Structures are given as C-alpha cells and as structure tokens.
Amino acid sequence: MSTAAVRLNEVVVNLHCPKATATWWALFRARGPAERFTTVTASIPGDLVDVACDDRADAEWLCAHMIEQGVPKTAIKILAGGKR
C-alpha cells in the first residue's frame, strides 16, 4: 500500500499542453507498472489518474519530473496517504 500518490488531470494535459507532453504522459502511463495507476474519473478528453508512490519524497520527485516534461502545475496534485 502506498503512502502517497500524484493525481494528474489528463484533460489539462491533453487540451492545454504541447503534443510532446501529452505523448510523454501517454507513454509513461502505458509503460509503467499497472498497479501504480488508478483511474479516479474517466472522461472523453482525459481521465483523472492517481499514480501511487512509495512515499511523499517519491511523489514530490514525480511531480517535479512531470513539470520538467511540460505538465503544468495546475494539472498535478500530491496526495498524502494516497488511496489505492
């Protein structure tokens, strides 16, 4: 069970980011371990997705990495004690 998670709003990524950022996220999600990803809300323009992390530091690292890839801060939220 994870102690933290990163929540990503795919709508923001898919509609408001460069195509390279949306492609990076799609590949990251597709190639990552399935048990780390939980779809919280599914929708046509994009899902609300939680990515389980080992701890808060891991979640903060992932958040920073996503921002480096072009994901806006408004699309990301760190959840302490992330639900799985």
Image (cartoon, rainbow, N blue to C red):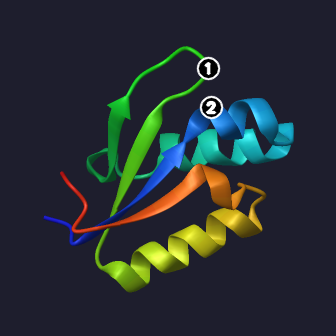
The residue identified by callout 2 is 11
Instruction: Tell me the number on the disc at residue 65.
Output: none
Relative image position of residue 23 (x, y in whole percent): 73, 40
Residue located at (28% from left, 75% from top): 54
Secondary structure type for disc 2: helix
Are there few (<14), some (14-19), or many (20+) residues within 10 Å of tag 1? few
Residue located at (41% from left, 85% from top): 57
Residue type marked 2? Val
Residue located at (83% from left, 44% from top): 20
Relative image position of residue 24 (x, y in whole percent): 70, 48
Are there few (<14), some (14-19), or many (20+) residues within 10 Å of tag 2? some
Relative image position of residue 37 (x, y in whole percent): 35, 46
Residue nearest the viewer, comparing 29 with 39: 39
Mark 1 vs 2, N-terminal side: 2
Q: Is residue 3 left or right of residue 73?
A: left
The residue identified by callout 1 is 45
Rendered-image quadrant of the N terminus: bottom left
Residue nearest the viewer, comparing 73 with 31: 73
Relative image position of residue 34 (x, y in whole percent): 33, 44
In this rendering, the answer to whether 81 lies above or below 23 is below
Residue type marked 1? Pro
Residue nearest the viewer, comparing 50 with 80: 80
Asked if the residues shown at circle 1 and circle 2 are in contact, with their CB atoms under 8 angstroms apart, the answer is yes
